[in-house]
Amino acid sequence: MERKLKELVDSAKSRIDLYKAPRKAIELAVKNPCGVRQSECSRNLNVAIVAAPCHGFGDIIFATKFARYIKYGFSGKLGGYSKKVTIVTPSPDMFTKLGVKDVKIVPLKGGSQQCRRLKSYNRPKNLKKFDLIFVAPLMADFKIDYTDVKALFKESTPFNTIFLSEYQARRSIDYDFATGSGPNHDGLLFDGLKSSAKLKTLGREPYALAYIAKDVGIPYCLSNFVKMIVAKYHKKYHNLQIVMPEWGITELSDNAALFKFVKKYYPNVNLKMKSGTIKAPSGAAATSTKNNNTLTLRGDILPVSRPDMLSLIKYSIEDILITGDQSITDVIDCCQQKNIWYQTVPWKSNFAKSLAAELPQKYLGRASTSCGTLKAIKWNRWKSATFKSRNDFRKKSKKRLDAIFRAATEAKNKNSIVGKYLDLMDQRVGKKSLGAVTRGRARCTLLS
């Protein structure tokens, strides 16, 4: 380890590199940084998960999954890294809505709840000093900025402050963990959360799920999916439902051209809202129609809790339309047999293209076909059953996270190599002086 640390010190181009050197040295030099039973990584470190979200629940779910990794461990069998995990956030109510009760939540005040830098907030009184600070995730529009974190956490340094990217962020930015799919990223956050049984059935008819966001991506995303579903399933399901946000029903309700197409396959169409059932546009049915199929568009179900959303995902028919990093991760985590369709928003085009290549699912690579297309009527299931195992953060990133916790554990011991090294860093010595770190009874140069 000492040799690797010296190499990293010699090659360092910035003080940030010097701060990161101890944990990188452990990652490179130690086969199992935490040992067989995690005994080398303290469970008594005080850990902050900083979650400053930017619209939607994706960032909230990301932070929750990661916090639970820290508290319970990746497998749940060997125990977690630390029981003292705190989510620090300007949006505590969003965690409450998701039912997060097993991790301590500390609210931040002083600025808007959304899309703000940490320096906008005030540190809560009586908040204990943290040994490790994870920004999880860092918004794609924000660059890594240690001074921003230090404005809120005075104990922050590049040694103990760890940045996790959103999925498929640009690899040119030096994130500690660049989450996303593919060989150049550190994996997706799976957690295997159990679905509820509440929405296993919605009456007697099977249903498709279209869970997308409003006013982002292509405007015909939802109608593309509806067209594909009715053309593909009209012979298999004579009575079918499509669950979607209520605003989707409103948006589609005056689309006469869409319903003219739909009624070729489902002559009877019902639009169900929370306030009741409304009529679909008349839209002439094809004269050759010889069936009495019924399609019901359901806007009366969503939104639901995450366990219930997992229930909708699990028990819906094969084709599913979804948006957001964590929603599509939940589909892959739960149901690898699904035909996944993805509402591609402009700032997630790289993620969509990566999924198109990795799943593989070629239609996800273009926004015009990613929500569904009539070209895919005969297409069924992406073929790679290994996608999840190849892109599981818990496997791809475990050693690096182990090294971070091992280094932070040793940092608390002032007589350890890491403790002495960081003490010199705090004194702002140069690279040459770092070579004078001593250990044990002799004043030997451990970095030589």
Image (cartoon, rainbow, N blue to C red):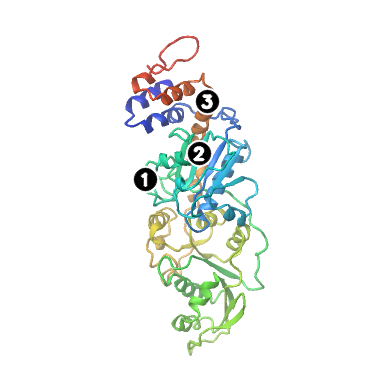
What amino acid is labelled 2 in the image? Answer: Ile
Q: Residue at x 58, y 42 (%)?
A: 86
Residue that lies at the very extreme toward the bottom in this rendered image: 287
Q: Find numbered disc 2 in the image and state the secondary structure of the residue it sits on.
A: strand
Is label 1 in contact with label 2 (beta carbons under 8 Å)? no
Q: Amino acid at mark 1?
A: Arg
46 and 354: which is toward the camera: 46
* Disc 2/disc 3 C-alpha distance (Å): 16 Å
Residue bearing the label numbered 3: 410
Mark toward the start of the polypeptide (2 vs 3): 2
Q: Which residue is mark 1?
A: 171
In the image, taking residue 129 as reference, residue 435 lies left or right, namely left
List x then y, in percent, for residue 52.
49, 50
Report the residue at 47% width, 53% height from top.
384
Query: Residue 265: x percent and y percent?
Result: 51, 81
The answer to whether any part of residue 73 appears in the image is no
Camera-nearest residue between 265 and 82: 82
The reply to whether discs 2 and 3 touch (Cβ–Cβ < 8 Å) is: no
Give the x, y percent position of residue 9. Answer: 36, 25
The kind of residue tagged 3 is Glu
| Label 3 element class | helix
Of the image marks 1 and 2, the number of the one nearer the N terminus: 2
Judged from the image, the secondary structure of the residue bearing numbered disc 1 is loop
Q: Which residue is mark 2?
A: 133
3D distance between C-alphas at marks 1 and 2:
21 Å
Task: Judge whether residue 178 can be spotted in this image.
Answer: yes
Q: Is residue 79 above or below residue 328?
A: above
Task: Please identify, in this view, whether the residue under mark 1 or under mark 2 is nearer the observer.
Answer: 2
